[in-house]
Amino acid sequence: MSLSSALSTAMAGLRANQAALSIVSSNVANAKTPGYVAQGVNQIEVAGGAGTGAGVRINGVNRQLDQYIQAQLRTETSGGAYADQTAGILSQLQNVYGTPGEAGTLETAFSKLTGALQGLSASSGASSAQAAVLSAAQSLAQQLNATTTGIQALRSNIEQDIGVSVGQANVAINQIAQYNARLQGMEVTDPAAATLMDQRDQAINQLAQLMDVRVVTDNTNQANVFTNSGIQLVGGGQASQLAFNSQGTLNANAQWNANPALSGAGTITVQLPNGGSFDLIANNAIASGQLAADIKLRDKTLVDAQAQVDQLAAVLASSLSDVTKPGAAVAGPPAGFDLDLSAVQPGNSINLTYTDTATSTQHQVTILRVDDPAALPLSNTATADPNDQVVGVNFSGGMASIVAQLNAALGPAHLQFSNPAGAVLRAVDDNTAAASVNAASTTTTVGSLASGAAQLPMFTDAGALYTGKLTVDGPQMTGLAGRIMVNPALMADPSKLTVYNTAPLTPSGDTTRADFIFSQLSSAQFTFGAQTGIGSAATPYKGTVSGFMQQFLSQQSNASVTATQLQQGQSVVVSTLQQKFNATSAVSIDTEMANLIALQNSYAANAHIMSVVQSMMTSLLQIQG
């Protein structure tokens, strides 16, 4: 090797050292900078004559990261944010319910009411016992009110959180597009590009906490971001925009609906760069991240929780006020029953049992009075029993209209209806021997405190009777737990907890009504709707009021525990992946110091070569002189 070649090689080495020292300095300076990915120099050997090396050339920098682990980390980060949000809200829901056995819980309030009813029966209706029952009933109603307030406060907070998250997502989406635009045309190895890519990755990571994302980087170093469902959020320098039409404070009736005209909760839409618009909630386009958790919590988890306490309130009211009266038998042929509809109110029902003689199959039919035409026709979800055929009938047109609607709906089942007199409905078979009517009854709501029966409207819907009526806005049961109260007339006259008849007057010491109320609330069996999340449409939950309450409280407690366990597990997964990612991408001071020492040694070696070459060249010049 000639002296000039040796000198050239040493100078190339010094230049490479200088570039490498600059990278080491940058790495050390940014060791604590969030999102900074450690960099290394790209060194290319420069060939000399006869295949010998003539030095090295620096060809930019490389970011030291594992893209596969990075993609995994983003996926699990979305899952972690989902788990964190779910666990946090369910923990707050448990605070709404309170600690079992302590004061200020549904269980305690219900237990005090049944205990007070036992005392009322044992004391033969003493005024002090009546006062104790009303006080306990008020406490239970107030606890239901407070539970509804707590559930809806959580939903309202989530509604606000969604709005904030959508704003944060838009910021991240716009930043990614802006970084893409700045990176357009830059080489991947450009040191300035490395810094921009770090910042772009940070924005993508922030977006991944809010929603599930998939990133595809093309050969021009443009990061195209999609949801896992395929919705493009960023395409090169173009950004989609999310929008959220927040509805502010939510109540039990404010529920999300795919039809914007019917929706009481906000929805998330995406405006694509080409002008197209897409409803992300209606199309289930967000599968993970905080936004996905918020959507499920607001529209499913907490709606179910509200439905559970509403169902409890509805059974408390209807179990004490509803009276079922059998129809009067009509000797045939055709045979059936006469039913007095004079007391049937909106939400009350006519109940029929008939047998299809060809198959010997028995069928149940529930005919509900529904005076809102917009709520018709009904589906079988209107009752708890999946084997119960439901027919909604508008009574506002009078008996002739009722008969016509029923014949149109049930005529094909070989049932026939008529109006023999007044408010009487006759339900018989059609005299073809194809069906036989086995039983018929009406279930109506007692409005009086002294009707002559043990039933009474002890609990009301903000002072009005609870009949279970249905309108286009939904069932009366929705939000009932927030409106339920003890009947003001009963509060004014506590004696009606004992006196159920005035002519003749209920005998002193009669415990018929107290025994009835206690029995209904402690041992009577009811069928609860599957919309509460307890049981299913095929096998609805059947049990006591107390049993149902224990079921949903236990369900919610288990859900909270499971969510916390999932959160903890997800945290471990994210932490492990972060450690793996950091092992290759984060700055290691020890590694950088080792690199610095190696560079110092290399610098010293190259400098020594230059010194030797200088000495040799000086000697040669002296010899020539």
Image (cartoon, grey):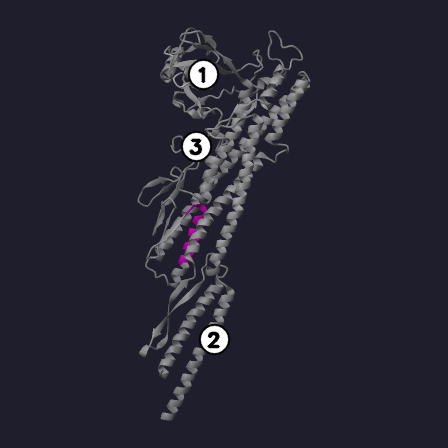
Residue with the mark numbered 3 = 264
- Residue under numbered circle 2: 601
Q: In x, y percent, where is residue 377?
A: 38, 22
Query: Mark 3: which amino acid?
Result: Gly
Q: Does the magenta stretch include residue 209?
A: yes
Q: Name the residue under label 1.
A: 352
The residue at 36%/92% (across/down) is 624
Neighbour tally class for label 3: few under 14, some 14-19, many 20 plus, Cα within 10 Å: some
Q: What's the CA distance linking mark 2 and mark 1?
A: 98 Å
Q: Which of marks 3 and 2 is nearer the N terminus?
A: 3
Residue 25 among magenta residues:
no
| 3D distance between C-alphas at marks 3 and 2 | 71 Å
Q: Which of 398 and 527 is in front in this view?
A: 527
As drawn, the residue found furthest toward the front would be: 359
Main secondary structure found in the magenta portion: helix
Q: Does residue 202 appear left or right of residue 542 in this picture?
A: left
Q: Where is residue 40 in the image (x, y as percent from the top left)?
A: 43, 65
The kind of residue tagged 2 is Asn
Mark linked to residue 143: none
Q: What stretch is highlighted in magenta?
A: 196-212
First in residue order: circle 3 vs circle 1: 3
Point out residue 226 in the picture as x, y percentages from the top left corner: 37, 48
Q: Disc 3 or disc 2, which is closer to the eye?
A: 2
Q: How crowded is mark 1: few (under 14 residues within 10 Å), some or many (20 or more)?
A: many
Q: Is residue 396 left or right of residue 451?
A: left
